Image (cartoon, rainbow, N blue to C red):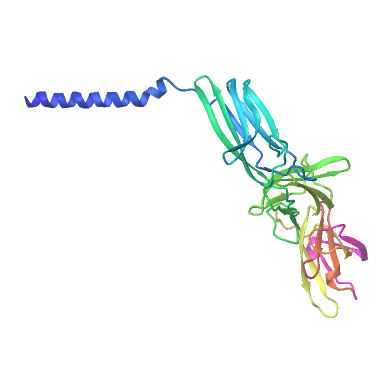
């Protein structure tokens, strides 16, 4: 009798296990189809009827199956405007735009609204909303800060770093052209919480080093509500890094240049070097053309003996020292950082 009871309990447990397993495997044996709408996206913000702002909010639909679609613009539970009215849309991508007006053509005030989508295909449906903000206020221009080799800390092998802090989130594009050809092109996303920091190693798009000198970089930013800003900054590209040691040595102070490659490797002491003092024509780290007129004659020396006596009667803060080799030119500041 005891054995029969044990056998009955075992059979019952086995039955329970098989039923549970069947419930678990049933969805895999008869899989349901995916959502009929693959993507439903819209602009986050726009600024209609505002000079320089984004005039419309774009809505993008990617439909997997032909569906009957209704797309409305709502404020809370009130329908302000119907963009698609119970219309059958084919499979694929569809685009719609809202210009910020209600069904009577009246402009809506700044605020938050929603796009509400209802799509039906057979027994399946898709019901979702996306928020959009009307904001006609033009934000302040992004702040731009540029550091180049010898005037700040840069990542290894880099020659210029530009930090762009826009007041809202949005793409930041860096580009420049030299002699009619594209030198650089980069796109980053920046915001006031996470600035876009672009580092440049001085190479062109075909990986050649840019010749030594100042390169003007165009910075194009678009705010979240569509306003654009175009700014410029300048990078000194020298393909050579140097720093100076100042020895007071009254009455004739002397500077010694320590030169290295972009990866920080010191030049061999026998490397031929030409030193030249010039006047500084700009201040700050966002340079114009920094090199003014030369002061004195070039000094032909080597990397192991790259010393020069400061010109008499000119404050050090108004001087640059350049060190030129066969591979590049290091631009070094004398005195305080500009």
Examine the structure image and report whether residue 302 is included in the region drawn in magenta: yes
Residue 129 image offset from top left, x and y in percent: 57, 36
* Residue 111 located left or right of residue 246: left
Q: Quadrant of the N terminus?
A: top left
Residue 207 image offset from top left, x and y in percent: 76, 41
Give the residue furthest to the bottom.
250
Kindly indicate the quadrant of the structure image that contains residue 284.
bottom right
Q: From what the image shows, is residue 250 above or below residue 267?
A: below
Q: Which residues are magenta?
A: 287-313
Kindly indicate the quadrant of the structure image that contains residue 20.
top left
Give the residue furthest to the front.
104
x 69%, y 46%: residue: 109
Q: Quadrant of the C terminus?
A: bottom right
x 92%, y 63%: residue: 294
* Residue 76 located left or right of residue 24: right
The residue nearer to you, when weighing 200 against 84, is 84
């Amino acid at each position: 009798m005891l054995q029969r009871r044990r056998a009955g309990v075992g059979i019952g447990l086995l039955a329970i296990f098989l039923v549970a397993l069947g419930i678990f495997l049933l969805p895999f044996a008869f899989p349901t189809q995916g959502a009929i709408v693959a993507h439903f996206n819209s602009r986050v913000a726009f600024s209609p009827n505002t000079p320089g702002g984004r005039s419309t909010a774009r809505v993008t639909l990617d439909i997997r199956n032909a569906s009957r679609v209704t797309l409305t613009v709502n404020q809370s539970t009130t329908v302000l405007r119907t963009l698609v009215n119970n219309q059958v849309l084919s499979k694929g991508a569809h685009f719609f735009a809202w210009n910020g007006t209600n069904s009577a053509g009246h402009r809506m005030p700044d605020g938050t609204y929603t796009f509400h989508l209802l799509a039906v295909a057979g027994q399946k449906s898709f019901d979702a909303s996306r928020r959009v903000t009307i904001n006609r206020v033009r934000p302040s221009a992004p702040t731009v800060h540029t550091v180049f080799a010898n005037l700040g800390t840069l990542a290894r092998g880099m020659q210029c770093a530009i930090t762009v802090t826009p007041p809202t989130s949005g793409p930041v594009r860096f580009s420049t052209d030299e002699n009619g050809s594209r030198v650089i092109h980069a796109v980053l996303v920046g915001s006031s919480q996470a600035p876009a920091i672009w580092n440049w190693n001085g190479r062109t798009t075909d990986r050649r080093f840019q010749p030594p000198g100042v390169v003007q970089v165009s910075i194009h930013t678009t705010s979240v509500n569509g306003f654009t800003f175009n700014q410029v900054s300048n990078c000194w590209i020298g393909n050579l890094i140097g720093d100076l040691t100042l020895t007071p040595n009254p009455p004739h102070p002397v500077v010694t240049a320590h030169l290295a490659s972009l990866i920080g490797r010191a030049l061999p002491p026998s490397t031929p070097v030409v030193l030249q003092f010039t006047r500084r024509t700009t201040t700050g780290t966002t340079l114009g053309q920094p090199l003014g007129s030369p002061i004195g004659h070039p000094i032909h020396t080597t990397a192991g003996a790259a010393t020069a006596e400061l010109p008499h009667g000119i404050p050090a803060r108004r001087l640059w020292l350049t060190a030129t080799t066969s591979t590049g030119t290091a631009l070094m500041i004398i005195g305080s950082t500009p």
